[in-house]
Image (tube, grey):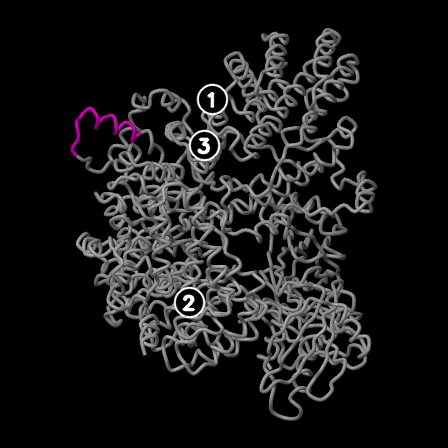
């Protein structure tokens, strides 16, 4: 490698050379630019630079607007303007000229015009619209170079709304004879897929053609689209696995032309891309994985050349091997390969080795043992990046036994670190480990003290609030709680006695709260002393008013009884002149409360009631206030996620030093509450009308909780051995280890590198304390859940109404946790799967027959019901009829609706009855039992009955009934056995849908060979192309034996669309009142009769549309989304296609509808 | 994914910058200054990858010129490190001398190699083909 570097090194100093000799005729005369660059290089101050650029920009401005400027000069001006913008000086006056240059220039000028556009404008710039015509013209040019440029710019930047205008032309280019045009067309489609996936739905077939293109370049560019699509939905592309494997095998085998080689390695970046695709396809899929074992093995073998790029491929290969379904032989080879990385003297390889190791230890912690000495060396490496990566690795292998030493190392790094981002990240990780694995209270509190002092005011705001909640909620053992609180009080008193002027505000706030809440638990501490310290804090200089407020509310809690009246008065007096109104109010409250001990006891009861406070979580008492505010012109409230969405849409690369997207301000009024750690204000009478604010911040803070819980592996940590580890805290090198443990660690040590014996021994000791508990636990956890570490601070489950919001976030964090662990660690998958089953079982006792009055209730209910599926409602009704299912029904006056069974073609075993009149037969019933819709529903238009799932005791199928006001989802349960099922309960949920009403979700008994029906009325509030519903049926075959049968399916927008009956005049009025529009070309059905009429009828048949009028080559169609808005469609025959123009007040409805139109026409 | 590519001289002056995700022009200078600080003062024997906020920087030095690429954490650092070298080799193949005065052409080359933050072409002949065709047409 180094020789290559040298070769280029000789050429590159010329980059900055100042000689004016233009080289080899390839350079154009750009003397002004050269002059500019040279002057800037010579400058010494920013101020001079600014002056110079301003002057330059003025000159450019003069020239671009002069009519005498030639295109050639314009090109040069444009490059100079680029240079100025690159240095950070806006030159927006040239933007329009850039577009002009692209329009009018020839060849190189045109290219520079396009280039300038792509550099100057962002995706949403309005000037981009002016580019569309130019692109359109160039795409049709006979000059290939112009076509090429147009395609390049389109794949960089193009207005989303104008894609339909050029899409047919780009599509056409897919079959161009020149490879470069085909390649660029594919890349342009990739761009379209990224910004508007719905627009290219119909050309998926052509992507496949590109993948099979005879030119490797075209195939390569199609991989970008595939990687993206497979990331989103791997299941749909499993059939391509074989093709990708073949391609990779050919590439690895050197079948590509030689100029694709990079330093004699065949197309390395292509190999990397293919390996990424394969690992996505093979993940959690044994049969797919088996297809790729051979080629992965070959890739490992072929990449033996000692060059960086082969290591880059190897890294990707190792990752793939550890991502797909495991194969022992390959894992072994991959592990050896990682050894080559981490043992390499080359630092870049070492880094990548650590990164690979960090990835694989999540699957197999034993690998860390193999490389423990290397890891220890890296831990003391002089390069901070290596050190940081090593800590990341250690973080992943932390368990109850090595937590003290690993946290010690992390804190040591934190003390040296001055990068804000790293501090925030590491502090969060330390806090996570501390809470999860703390060996004892003392260690926990001290570690958290360091966390708070180092993390300071940078850290995530949910960190201190989580910490305080740990105190407030308590764990399962009361005695342990008490000890923790006592120790914390002790520790904080000691902190306050020292010099606390340098402590971060957040830490002081935590201290204040804990002292206010728990110092009274401590009998041997003089309350006067606590009060004195808090008062000192209150008066200390440099303390923020927020912290003062915390301290003051702590004082308020402590000042009970008549003995404190004098102190209270004194405080009130000194604060009465404070500029801070909150402090003034709090001081006043303190004054009143200290005089009336009964009131004090009522307002601030002790011990603080933790979760049985009743909270009006709907904040209905504020309704009047809100409506007044709205009437007065206030902006309507937006929930945090919506604000965040809008915020994130606006900016792309986050350049704030601290990536928090929500400004979470802790309202100081929450401080008076006993519940302040959760930021839920409970005493609205005290804080007056500011409660609204505190409720909101409360909601924000609670939402953040659970998000941070990045990584959890509670499932496989063996029981901690507290007697061993504490010694490691102070002097890691002198760790006292039990002989068998040390022995175990040492036997698995690799041959250590020669080192001075003393040092060596120290390192080995460090190793044994770092990697303790790794070797043995794996075999244990693989066998079964024999020993599981109990997290020290197991939070109490919060079940009460008061915590409805927090409950939701907890349950979602649980579910994300379990899904992550199952996907990340297949080795431990078996263990983790056990988790969800238990909570579901006992929850069904709480089911009530009528549940969902709206999605809110359903969600609340779900927290109790299950920790795995988030939002669930329920429904059942019993009925059995023997009528025929008929999917063809008359609706309205002119519509015959034949609804194809769109319901989740992939996920549902579709029991489609061919003749459309045959009833559904169930596989498990011995003599095909027949299921029918209740008679009153038979009259309505409905879909076929399709089977969702079944087990030996129960089959579940469903049917969609298209009522005029809603979609009725009918679930049919059938018991094929002879024995009755008891306590049958159905749960159904769909996040995106509003569940308006439901019936009969619980049944005491379902007799053998009988069926039952549950109905669910669904509404779609915001258009989604497809929504998934999930649910489960629980039942008992005999008392105490609860079975759960989960099911899922999909619904599409089409299910929620109904015809909108309008006449032409009404249509015209409505059309003009809507401004939001989308245009697209659709396939025109040919063959037989009027193509327009045929196409519209086909659409009408498969989607419920109303054809308002057809005149000549134009047609107008109307429909509406249930409970949503209307969507109007204007169609005009344009050559061989149908130009459709949609308008709807709902921004995403036209896209959804178009998608279904395309599908409907394709199926036709 | 690649977020940006910078070419910076030893004095920390930007010679070329290309962003694959929109960054406000006012914020670019700050980012570039940070990047320069993070990479330029590292020692030869130190790792060529640096953490910067929530992404990684991959840098490579050629005499007085630094090329720095900002990537997301899921990207393969070493492959980007070699991509930079491939880029330099292409530049070397096309320009016989001073390339910095040809800001536009360097961009045109880069556009052939990286699109939307993804590596789309690494074959040197194919990267240069469109530009050579342009040159040929301009001459005639």
On the image, the x and y values in percent for residue A1056 come to 71, 67
Residue at disc 2, secondary structure: helix
Q: Earlier in the sequence, mark 1 or mark 3?
A: 3
On the image, the x and y values in percent for residue B60 come to 29, 49
* Residue beneath the point at 68% across and 55% down: A986
* Residue beneath the point at 44% across and 61% down: B116
Residue topped by disc 3 = A430
Point out the stretch of residues depicted in magenta: A754-768
Res. A580 in view: yes
Q: CA distance from mark 1 to mark 3?
A: 12 Å
Q: The N terminus of chain A lies in which quarter of the figure?
A: bottom left
Q: Earlier in the sequence, mark 2 or mark 1?
A: 2
Q: Residues within 10 Å of mark 3 (few under 14, many from 20)?
A: many
Residue topped by disc 1 = A446
Q: Nearer the viewer, residue A928 or A24?
A: A24
Say if mark 2 contacts mark 1, CB within 8 Å: no
Above-or-below relation of A763 to A152 = above
Residue topped by disc 2 = A73
Q: Quadrant of residue A913?
A: bottom right
Q: Earlier in the sequence, mark 2 or mark 3?
A: 2
Q: Nearer the viewer, residue A516 or A932?
A: A516
Residue at disc 1, secondary structure: helix
Q: The C terminus of chain A lies in which quarter of the figure?
A: bottom right
Chain ID of residue with mark 1: A
- A114 relative to A371 in the view: left or right: right
On the image, the x and y values in percent for residue A392 come to 38, 39
Say if mark 1 contacts mark 3, CB within 8 Å: no
| Number of the front mark, 2 or 3 | 2
Residue at disc 3, secondary structure: helix
């Amino acid at each position: 490698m180094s020789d290559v570097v040298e070769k280029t090194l000789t050429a590159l100093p010329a980059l900055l050379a100042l000689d004016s000799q233009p080289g080899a005729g390839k350079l154009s005369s750009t003397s002004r630019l050269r002059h500019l660059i040279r002057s800037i290089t010579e400058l010494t101050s920013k101020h001079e630079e600014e002056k110079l650029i301003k002057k330059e920009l003025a000159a450019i401005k003069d020239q671009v607007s002069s009519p005498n400027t030639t295109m050639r000069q314009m090109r040069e001006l444009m490059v100079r303007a680029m240079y100025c913008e690159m240095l950070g000086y806006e030159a927006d006056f040239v933007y329009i000229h850039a577009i002009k240059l692209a329009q009018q220039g020839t060849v190189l000028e045109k290219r520079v015009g396009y280039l300038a556009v792509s550099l100057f404008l962002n995706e949403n710039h309005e000037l981009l619209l002016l580019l569309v015509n130019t692109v359109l013209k160039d795409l049709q040019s006979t000059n290939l170079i112009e076509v090429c440029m147009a395609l390049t710019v389109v794949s960089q930047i193009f207005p989303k709304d104008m894609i339909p205008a050029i899409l047919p032309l780009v599509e056409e280019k897919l079959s161009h004879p020149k490879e470069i045009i085909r390649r660029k067309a594919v890349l342009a489609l990739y761009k379209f897929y990224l910004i508007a996936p719905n627009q290219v739905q119909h050309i998926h077939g052509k992507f496949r053609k590109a993948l099979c293109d005879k030119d490797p370049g075209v195939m390569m560019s199609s991989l970008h689209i595939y990687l993206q699509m497979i990331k989103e939905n791997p299941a749909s592309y499993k059939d391509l696995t074989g093709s990708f494997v073949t391609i990779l095998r050919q590439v690895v085998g050197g079948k590509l032309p030689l100029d694709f080689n990079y330093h004699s390695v065949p197309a390395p970046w292509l190999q990397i891309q293919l390996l990424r695709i394969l690992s996505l396809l093979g993940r959690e899929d044994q049969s797919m994985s088996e297809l790729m074992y051979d080629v992965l093995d070959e890739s490992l073998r072929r990449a033996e050349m000692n060059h960086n790029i082969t290591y880059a491929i190897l890294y990707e290969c190792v990752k793939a091997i550890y991502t797909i379904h495991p194969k022992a032989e390959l894992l072994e080879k991959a592990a050896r390969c990682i050894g080559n990385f981490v043992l390499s003297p080359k630092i870049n390889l070492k880094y990548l080795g650590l990164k690979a190791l960090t990835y694989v230890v999540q699957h197999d912690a034993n690998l860390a043992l193999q490389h423990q000495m290397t890891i220890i060396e890296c831990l003391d490496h002089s390069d901070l990046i290596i050190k940081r990566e090593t800590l990341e690795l250690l973080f992943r292998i932390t368990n109850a036994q090595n937590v003290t030493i690993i946290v010690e190392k992390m804190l040591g790094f934190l003390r040296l670190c001055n990068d804000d981002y790293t501090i925030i990240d590491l502090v969060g990780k330390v806090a996570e480990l501390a809470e999860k694995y703390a060996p004892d209270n003392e260690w926990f509190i001290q570690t958290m003290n360091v966390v708070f002092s180092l993390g300071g005011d940078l850290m995530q705001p949910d960190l201190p609030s989580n910490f305080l909640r740990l105190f407030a909620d308590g764990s399962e053992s009361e005695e342990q709680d008490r000890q923790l609180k006592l120790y914390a009080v002790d520790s904080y008193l000691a902190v306050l006695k020292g010099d606390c002027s340098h402590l971060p505000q957040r830490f002081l706030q935590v201290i204040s709260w804990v002292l206010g809440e728990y110092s009274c638990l401590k009998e041997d501490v003089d309350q006067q002393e606590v009060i004195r310290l808090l008062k000192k804090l209150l008066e200390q200089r440099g303390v923020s008013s927020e912290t003062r407020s915390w301290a003051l509310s702590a004082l308020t809690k402590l000042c009970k009884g008549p003995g404190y009246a004098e102190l209270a008065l004194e405080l009130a007096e000194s604060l009465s002149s404070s500029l801070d109104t909150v402090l003034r109010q709090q001081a006043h409250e303190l004054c009143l409360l200290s005089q009336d001990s009964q009131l004090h006891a009522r307002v601030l009861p002790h011990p603080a009631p933790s979760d049985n406070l009743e909270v009006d979580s709907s904040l209905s008492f504020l309704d009047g206030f809100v409506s007044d505010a709205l009437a007065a012109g206030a902006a309507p409230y937006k929930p945090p996620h919506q604000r965040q969405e809008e915020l994130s849409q606006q900016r792309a690369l986050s350049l704030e030093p601290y990536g928090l997207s929500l400004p979470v301000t802790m309202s100081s009024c929450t401080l008076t509450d006993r519940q302040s750690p959760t930021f839920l204000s409970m005493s609205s009478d005290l804080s007056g009308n500011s409660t609204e604010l505190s409720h909101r911040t409360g909601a924000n803070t609670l939402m953040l909780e659970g998000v941070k819980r990045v990584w959890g592996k509670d499932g496989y940590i063996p029981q901690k051995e507290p007697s061993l580890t504490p010694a490691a805290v102070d002097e890691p090198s002198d760790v006292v280890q039990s002989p068998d443990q040390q022995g175990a660690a040492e036997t698995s040590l690799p041959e250590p590198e020669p080192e001075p014996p003393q040092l060596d021994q120290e390192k080995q000791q460090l190793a044994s304390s770092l990697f303790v508990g790794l070797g043995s636990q794996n075999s244990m956890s693989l066998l079964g859940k024999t020993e599981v570490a109990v997290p020290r601070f197991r939070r109490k489950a919060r079940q009460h109404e008061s915590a409805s919001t927090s409950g939701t976030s907890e349950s979602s964090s649980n579910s994300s946790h379990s899904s992550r662990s199952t996907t990340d660690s297949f080795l431990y998958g078996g263990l983790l799967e056990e988790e969800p089953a238990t909570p579901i079982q006992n929850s069904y006792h709480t089911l009530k027959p009528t549940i969902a009055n709206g999605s809110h209730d359903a969600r609340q209910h779900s927290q109790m019901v299950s920790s795995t599926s988030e939002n669930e409602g329920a429904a059942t009704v019993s009925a059995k009829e023997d009528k025929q299912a008929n999917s063809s029904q008359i609706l309205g006056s002119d519509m015959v609706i034949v609804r194809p069974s769109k319901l989740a073609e992939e996920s549902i075993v579709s029991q489609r009855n061919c003749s459309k009149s045959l009833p559904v037969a169930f596989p498990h019933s011995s003599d095909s039992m027949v299921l029918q819709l209740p008679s009153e529903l038979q009259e309505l238009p409905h879909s076929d009955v399709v089977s969702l799932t079944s087990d030996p005791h129960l089959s579940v199928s469903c049917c969609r009934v298209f009522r005029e006001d809603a979609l009725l989802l009918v679930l049919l349960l059938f018991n094929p056995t002879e024995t009755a099922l008891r306590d049958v309960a159905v749960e159904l949920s769909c996040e995106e849908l509003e569940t308006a009403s439901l019936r009969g979700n619980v049944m005491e008994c379902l007799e053998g060979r009988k069926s039952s029906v549950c109905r669910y009325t669904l509404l779609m509030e915001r258009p989604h192309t497809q929504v998934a519903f999930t649910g489960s049926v629980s039942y008992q075959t005999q008392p105490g034996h609860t079975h759960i049968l989960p099911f899922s399916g999909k619904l599409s927008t089409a299910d929620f669309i109904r015809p909108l009956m309008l006449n032409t005049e009404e249509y015209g009025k409505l059309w003009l009142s809507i401004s939001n529009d989308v245009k697209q070309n659709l396939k025109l059905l040919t063959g037989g009769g009027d193509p327009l009429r045929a196409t519209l009828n086909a659409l009408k048949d498969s989607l419920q549309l109303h054809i308002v009028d057809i005149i000549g080559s134009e047609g107008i169609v109307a429909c509406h989304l249930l409970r949503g808005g209307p969507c109007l469609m204007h169609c005009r025959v344009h050559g061989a296609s149908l130009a459709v123009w949609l308008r709807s007040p709902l921004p995403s409805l036209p896209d959804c509808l178009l998608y279904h139109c395309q599908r409907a026409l394709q199926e036709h | 994914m690649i977020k940006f590519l910078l070419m910076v001289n030893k004095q920390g002056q930007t010679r070329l910058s290309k962003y694959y995700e929109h960054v406000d022009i006012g914020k670019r200078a700050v980012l570039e200054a940070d990047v320069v600080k993070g990479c330029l003062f590292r020692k030869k024997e130190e790792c060529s990858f640096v953490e910067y906020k929530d992404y990684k920087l991959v840098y490579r030095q050629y005499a007085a010129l630094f090329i720095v690429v900002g990537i997301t954490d899921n990207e393969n650092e070493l492959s980007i490190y070699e991509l930079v070298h491939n880029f330099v080799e292409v530049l070397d193949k096309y320009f016989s001398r001073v390339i910095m005065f040809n800001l536009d052409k360097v961009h045109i080359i880069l556009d052939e190699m990286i699109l939307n933050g993804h590596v789309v072409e690494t074959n040197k002949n194919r990267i240069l083909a469109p530009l050579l065709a342009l040159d040929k047409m301009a001459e005639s």
